[in-house]
Image: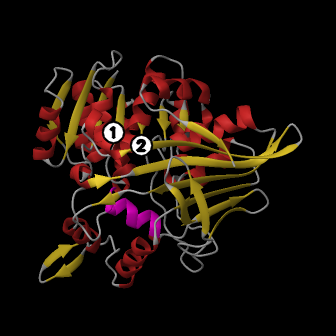
Amino acid sequence: MKVLLVGVGGVGEAIAVVARDRPWLEQMVLADYNSKRVEEVYHKLGSPAKYVPEWIDAGDKALVVEMARKYGVDLIMNAVDPVFNENLFDAAFEVGCNYMDMAMTLSTPHPTNPYQECGVKLGDYQFERARQWEEKGLLALLGMGVEPGMADVFAAYAAKHLFDEIEEIGVRDGANLVVHGYEFAPNFSIWTTIEECLNPPVIWEADRGWYTTEPFSEPEVFEFPEGIGPLECVNVEHEEVLLVPRWIKCKRVTFKYGLGEEFIRVLKTIKMLGLDNKEPIDVKGVKVAPRDVVAACLPDPAHLGDRMTGKTCAGTWVKGIKDGKPRQVYIYQVADNEECMKRYGVQAVVWQTGVNPVIAMELIETGVWQGKGVLGPEAFDPDPFMAKMLEYDFPYGIVEM
């Protein structure tokens, strides 16, 4: 497989690291707007022949098309902020190659009733074009990171093996990670963090469809495994709620994040000051997006690994009926930052995200996963993916709740 990897930030680097010694990978083009970052990752990988460093502007569709054709790639792997999703998605279609991302095209809140009704939903742009992709014989695999991605595979696994009827599927994410030396330092893209945490969260119910609620609503305490413990989790906008109901029969789908009071307070302040705005404003004659200023003021998540301690847990809680009896399970993956840094040289959150698209690449390249059109992880058999997790030193756990 030949891959054009657009974006070599923290997660992009992790993808390259995980894919490095895989025999099915013929070539991976490491492309980013930040040339110094490209060279940093390229040399960190040991400058192997199968990797090619390139400069790219993800906002320039024609340039992406040109580069994909130059290297004859089979897949465009989107590892940049989702503001570029439409460009990369459309570029892959124009080239005639497959496409994969870890976050779908962006939403737009309802103009008059944002906390009750959906406006433009996550992924709407892509799903509206599903027929064209199918007719062209191409695959666009959406949301194939950890959440969404692995969490969706877990939902499909639970539906296939663990339940006869499902009442609710709820993705629950929590961590006890600490970034030493900073008062506020998100371990993931702040651009994405602002987008998903401050937008109206989406909930799906079988008798109501998709609807929205207030940010940080419906707090609940969830007990996370492997020493992380109880954390208060709140509703956050996330792709799983838009993906799971398309393929899995259930009554309700939610996503809740264990953000913590301090983190929520900072995000609310950013919102209050208008610093979440992604549209450029005039600052003494210079056009700048407030959200980009926030990002520039914070440390790069890709370089926080040596300052972080603790674990992060991503997983899927499922409630329903099995053999006539009520059942609740949590299927999860825990990444320890110290272990990730020691083994892979990348921090836990980006490693946990980056493993999943690489597994999916292998399953597609070997023909185990086959599909055409615009699909989510739930559209595929979860068993081969779960088996590959162990091969990739990426173990999962299942606990009865």
- Residue 143 lies, in percent from the top left, at 48, 44
Q: Residue at x 48, y 69 (%)?
A: 199
Q: Are marks 2 and 1 in contact (CB under 8 Å)?
A: yes
Give the camera-side residue of 154 and 237: 154
Q: Is residue 302 magenta?
A: no
Q: Which mark is residue 176?
A: none
Observer able to see residue 386: yes
Q: Residue at x 37, y 30 (%)?
A: 75
| Left or right: residue 238 compared with residue 262 | right
Observer able to see residue 98: no
Q: Residues within 10 Å of mark 2 (few under 14, many from 20)?
A: many
Secondary structure, mark 2, is strand
Kind of residue indicated by mark 1:
Glu
Q: Residues within 10 Å of mark 1 (few under 14, many from 20)?
A: some
Disc 2: which residue: 335
Q: Residue at x 46, y 69 (%)?
A: 260
What is the quadrant of residue 247 in the picture? top right
What is the quadrant of residue 300 in the picture? bottom left
Give the camera-side residue of 204 and 387: 387
Alpha carbon of mark 2 to alpha carbon of mark 1: how far? 8 Å
Disc 1: which residue: 339
Residues in magenta?
A: 186-197
Kind of residue indicated by mark 2:
Ala
- Residue 40 lies, in percent from the top left, at 12, 40
